[in-house]
Each structure stands twice: as structure tokens, then as C-alpha cells.
Amino acid sequence: MGTGDREALLARLNELRIEHRDLDTVIARLTASGQADQIHLARLKKRKLKLKDEIAWIENRLIPDIIA
């Protein structure tokens, strides 16, 4: 993996982590308000899970394979 690729992945990883954290905040506020639309809340949670999967995929790409 080239340096440019690594930097691009790190930048994308940072963006995803920020969005994941923001969604966490939005979900918590909607849940606390008690007036959350359940369908909207479910979509936000689904998006958060998708972000988590993408974050894990990028982290796995950034960690070099170590053969034991």
C-alpha cells in the first residue's frame, strides 16, 4: 500500500469516525426526547452500524498482516 493510499484511508477513517460519533449523539438525543419516530431512529441506527463496519474494514486494511 502506497503512502498516498494510506493517507487517503486515514482521512476517510477520520471522516467515518466523526459521522459515527455524530449519529451516536443524534440517536441519544432523539431517544431521550421520547418523541422519536421509530422508523427514522431505526434508519439512523442502521447507518451507524454500516459506518462501524466500514471503519472496521479500513482499520483492517491499515494494520499490516502478521503471519505467526
Image (cartoon, grey):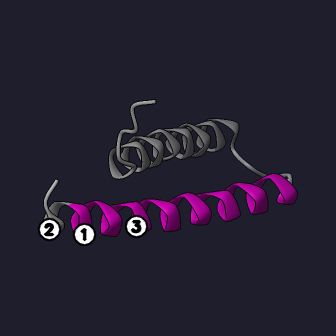
Q: Amino acid at mark 3?
A: Glu
Q: Amino acid at mark 2?
A: Gly
Q: How far is disc 3 from disc 1 in space, using C-alphas? A: 12 Å
Q: How far is disc 2 from disc 3 in space, using C-alphas? A: 17 Å
Q: Which residue is mark 3?
A: 15
Name the element at disc 1: helix
Name the element at disc 2: helix
Task: Report the residue that reaches farthest toward the top.
Answer: 68
Given residues 36 and 5, the one toward you in this image is 5
| Earlier sequence position, callout 3 versus callout 1 | 1
Q: How far is disc 2 from disc 1 in space, using C-alphas? A: 5 Å
CB-based contact (under 8 Å), mark 3 and mark 1: no
**Mark 3, mark 1: which one is toward the viewer?**
1
Given residues 29 and 22, the one toward you in this image is 22
* Mark 1 surroundings: few (<14), some (14-19) or many (≥20) residues within 10 A: few
Q: Which residue is mark 1?
A: 7
Residue 59 higher or lower than 3, as above or below = above
Whether 22 is among the magenta residues is: yes
Q: Tell me what residue is drawn at x 47 percent, y 38 percent.
A: 53
Q: Tell me what residue is drawn at x 25 percent, y 69 percent.
A: 7
Q: Which residue is mark 2?
A: 4
Q: Amino acid at mark 1?
A: Glu
Given residues 46 and 58, the one toward you in this image is 58
14 to the left or right of 1? right
CB-based contact (under 8 Å), mark 2 and mark 1: yes
Q: Tell me what residue is drawn at x 39 percent, y 61 percent.
A: 13
Start-end of magenta stretch: 6-33
Q: Where is residue 34? Give x, y as percent.
A: 86, 52
